[in-house]
């Protein structure tokens, strides 16, 4: 009796009219429709905090910290794949799995630190979008922040009409971000030798460690770790009914389907984060090549003025539009992540609109208080770097457990890679504490 595997065509049969190989058919018909969740998560890797951290790095230290971005992006690929894998295999998000396992007191404490991370994320995103509107139209920062919040509500409304529509809207904004931030690099590329020199790991004083930590916090984003498990679950593990207490019952894929989904997810994560990594490196290289030593270029406003002076007003507008797209997309994704975190850990679900309004307040208070925007962005990324361990360690603990992941629990190389990432991240944060004391 034939099994359910796709049969191969014998070599002696004519080749005319033969179907493509199973692998090629999967790539053509099965793979592309499965892509998307990682591109939503990748928005977190090109938010205004990244712009501030990477421009600050390039303007102050030239190519010194290129290696930090390369290493952080490699870590991000592994971490985001682990998060998506957890959601697909278990049919649960990371916050849901933690909410089921932590006692009430620890669950609330864990949620509080996650909320601090979410607030820091929103500060970066709203401030960046407000700054873009100020650069483009001269709007006061508080007014720009309100506009960013209102427009992000529209994007969240798209999410309510279906995940694929939300993914399409986010990918469109990602394209705008890429064009906005890479244009100046194409016009004035750096010297290859200088870029290669930046791949040698080293620091230059305590301040460079602070900047490196902000780059790491802006690249490996805690809220993206929580969110990606939910994005992959919602896309690939459909809900079939509602159980007791409103709990969603999902149809878990069988082993064969799971392997197909995990294969597609690897392509999704690698392609999305390679793109995001290229944008981040481009930002640093633009600053290192054109802004180093120029007064005021360690702020986004100063960098924008220098870009206009070096490349003309058109490129300056393109850069500001990229920054605006970054703020709008990332603040919507951040609000989505906050709702996932709250729902999973506290078993409380509030409308995304209400969530958006609440998390907008701290950013508007900072803008109204006259805090220097780029400084606020960099500090917010340092806060995020401290939140990474709280998301990453539970993720690796869960993906390594056979009672959670079954046959898809981490193998030896995945364990080594994941825990090496965790040690490096925690080590950098400890160094930041010691040097900053």
Image (cartoon, grey):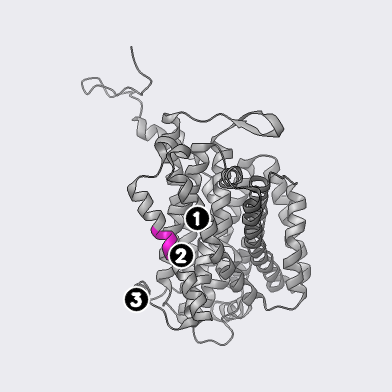
Label drawn at residue 60:
none
Q: Which mark is residue 197?
A: 3
Residue topped by disc 2? 425
Within 10 Å of the Cα at label 2, are there few (<14), some (14-19), or many (20+) other Cα atoms?
many
Q: Earlier in the sequence, mark 1 or mark 2?
A: 1
Q: Quadrant of the C terminus?
A: bottom right
Instruction: Identify the residue position indicated by label 1 in the image.
Output: 392
Q: What is the distance, in whole Å, between disc 3 and disc 2 at their CAs?
A: 23 Å
Q: Could you say which is closer to the camera, residue 160 or residue 422?
A: 422
Residue under the image location 57 percent in, 47 percent down: 98
Point out the residue furthest to the left here: 12
Residue contact between numbered discs 1 and 2, judged by CB atoms under 8 Å:
yes
**Mark-to-mark CA distance, 1 and 3:** 30 Å
Question: Are the residues at dot 1 and dot 3 in contact (C-beta closer than 8 Å)?
Answer: no
Tell me which residue sits at (36%, 77%) in the image: 194
Instruction: State how far apart marks 1 and 2 are (Cα).
Output: 10 Å
The residues colored magenta run 420-424
x%, y% of residue 293?
Answer: 50, 87
Mark 1 neighbour class, 10 Å CA radius: few under 14, some 14 to 19, many 20 or more:
many
> Does residue 161 sit above or below 133 in this rendering?
above
Residue 66 or residue 87, whichever sits in front: 87
């Amino acid at each position: 009796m034939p099994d359910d595997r796709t049969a191969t065509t014998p070599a002696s049969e004519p080749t005319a009219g033969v179907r493509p190989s199973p692998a090629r058919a999967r790539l053509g018909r099965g793979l592309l429709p499965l892509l998307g969740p990682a591109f939503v998560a990748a928005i977190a890797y090109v938010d205004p905090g990244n712009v501030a951290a990477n421009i600050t790095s390039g303007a102050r230290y030239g190519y010194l910290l290129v290696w930090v971005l390369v290493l952080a992006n490699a870590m991000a690929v592994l971490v985001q794949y682990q998060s998506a894998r957890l959601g697909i295999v278990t049919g649960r998000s990371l916050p849901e799995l933690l909410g089921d396992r932590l006692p009430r007191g620890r669950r609330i404490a864990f949620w509080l630190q996650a909320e601090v991370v979410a607030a820091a994320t929103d500060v970066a995103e709203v401030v960046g979008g407000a700054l873009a509107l100020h650069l483009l139209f001269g709007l006061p920062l508080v007014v720009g922040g309100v506009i960013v919040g209102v427009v992000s509500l529209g994007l969240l409304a798209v999410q309510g009409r279906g995940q694929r529509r939300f993914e399409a809207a986010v990918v469109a904004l990602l394209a705008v971000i890429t064009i906005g931030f890479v244009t100046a690099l194409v016009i004035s590329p750096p010297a290859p030798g200088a870029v290669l020199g930046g791949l040698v790991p080293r620091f230059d004083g305590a301040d460079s460690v602070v900047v490196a930590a902000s780059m790491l916090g802006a690249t490996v984003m805690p809220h993206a770790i929580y969110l990606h498990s939910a994005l992959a679950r919602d896309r690939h593990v459909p809900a079939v009914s509602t159980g007791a207490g409103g709990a969603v019952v999902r149809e878990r894929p069988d082993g064969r389907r799971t392997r197909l989904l995990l294969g597609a997810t690897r392509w999704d994560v690698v392609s999305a984060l390679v793109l995001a990594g290229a944008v981040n490196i481009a930002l640093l290289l633009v600053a290192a090549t054109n802004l180093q030593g120029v007064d005021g270029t360690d702020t986004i406003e100063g960098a924008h003025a220098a870009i206009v002076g070096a490349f003309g007003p058109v490129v300056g507008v393109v850069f500001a539009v990229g920054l605006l797209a970054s703020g709008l997309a990332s603040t919507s994704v951040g609000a989505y992540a906050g709702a996932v975190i709250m729902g999973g850990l506290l078993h409380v679900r509030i409308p995304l609109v209400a969530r958006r309004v609440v998390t907008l307040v701290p950013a508007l208070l900072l803008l109204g208080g006259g805090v220097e925007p780029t400084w606020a962005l960099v500090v917010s990324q340092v806060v995020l770097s401290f939140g990474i361990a709280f998301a990453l360690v539970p993720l690796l603990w869960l993906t390594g457990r056979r009672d959670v992941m079954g046959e898809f629990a981490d193998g030896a190389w995945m364990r080594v890679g994941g825990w090496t990432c965790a040690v490096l991240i925690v080590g950098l944060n400890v160094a930041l504490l010691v040097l900053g004391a």
